[in-house]
Image (cartoon, rainbow, N blue to C red):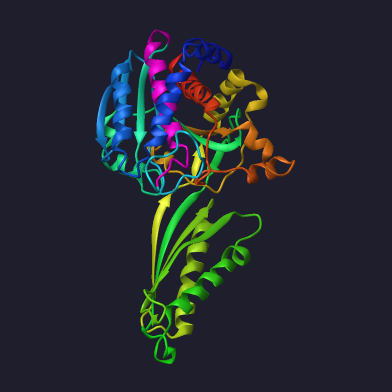
Amino acid sequence: MSAPADVARLTREITSGLKTGDLEDFYTDLHRHPELSFAEHRTAAKLAQRLRTAGYKVTEGVARTGVVGVLVNGAGPVVWLRGDMDALPVREATGLAYASTVDGLMHACGHDLHVTWLAAAAEVLAAARETWSGTLVVVGQPAEEAEGGAAAMVADGVHVRFPRPDALFGQHAAPGLAGFYPHTPGLTLSASDDVDVVVHGVGGHGSRPESTVDPVVTAAYIVTRLQTVVAREVAASESAVLTVGRFHAGTKPNIIPAEARLALNVRTQETRVRERVLTAIRRVVEGECAAAGCPVPPEVIVHPGYPNTVNDPALDGEIAAVHRELFGDHTVFDFGQAMGSEDFSLLAPPGVPYDYWYVTSTPAAVWEAAPGQELREKFEGVPGNHSPLFAPDLSVLAPGVRTLVSAALSRLTG
């Protein structure tokens, strides 16, 4: 690896010609046209077109809508840069001039920014290929939003069809005053599992509840009881989040349905905590159904989701040092372990180090208007990822390109 100061200097040189207007046009176009997981056809085509124009060998349709661009530039290491492409079923409420034109869909997590950063970084590095040596692989990943896009790419042979990486890099737009680049060595994001629960009751007329076993009441008890799992069964020094995200039962007010369905999400950072929480969920569900006299045992189906994201500490330290040189010492700090989850780590073959950092993106005016004085108070008062009000500042477009470019150069030079 080259010295951080040298990498930062080279990054400034080769990104000095970044065209802000082009970045804004590309980003706002993507924002206007959000697409859900595994349906990112337009987004993927836009990314593929820019990669081809820049000289990459491009493969489309990886895991249905994924894009992989490969640029071989002499001997040297293989670096992968990844950006996810999918949007969310959120109705936008930002009022932006370039707000979503698709009703009920929005880039509420910043993946439109990720694609813009990825495409521009790929172009910059291709144009400056005389300054580095090795192979650059650009990955446009579909379906990060709890749809298993990274696993689908692996299943479609991304690790064997394309040059094996020596290092993998990714980044994410995050709330926080624009202009900071948080890095966390080691564990940075949590594991995530989804759990489906089906409560089987005995349906009947609403006027004769005594002839039924009401699954709505039983499921309500389950929801309430589940709130004690983290509060009373997970130590205060450990981290876990249990969310009931969906409760569905019934069709009419005067019909007691025959079943109720719950959808849960579990976030943990340690395997033993995960096992404890999942065991407790099953125990609570089975216990409440038994207490209610349900005629059939409940169904508890665990869908293993994303693993923990654990940055290679040495690699993260190196990239953080480069970003400090590039943007200033005060702009890089340890964000800490978050309960959010990502499938980014699945793109790294076993034994390959990876680094995943953040680019804060809240406009200064929004940050200043947020209630509170302390950092945490401000952070909780601004729109975050998945909010219908999430609107990154356009000032982060060029810096987000430079973070990726500098990370790649840290391995492709020296």
Name the residue nearer the viewer: 18 or 294.
Answer: 18
Q: Position of residue 166 (x, y in %)?
A: 40, 27
Name the residue nearer the viewer: 33 or 374.
Answer: 33
Residue at left offset 47%, top offset 11%: 17
Image quarter for residue 224? bottom right
Q: Is residue 56 left or right of residue 337?
A: left
Name the residue nearer the viewer: 251 or 277.
Answer: 251
* Total tally of numbered discs in the picture: 0
Q: Position of residue 80 (x, y in %)?
A: 39, 27
Identify the residue at the far right of this view: 373
Magenta span: predominant SS is: helix
- Which residues make up the magenta segment? 105-131
Q: Position of residue 178 (x, y in %)?
A: 60, 30
Is residue 167 in sight in this rendering? no
Q: Position of residue 136 (x, y in %)?
A: 36, 21
Residue at left offset 53%, top offset 15%: 7
Residue at left offset 43%, top offset 36%: 111
Identify the residue at the far top of this view: 130
Q: Is residue 251 magenta?
A: no
Q: Is residue 127 magenta?
A: yes
Q: Is 70 situated above or below 233?
A: above
Q: Is residue 277 left or right of residue 150?
A: right
Is residue 320 in sight in this rendering? yes
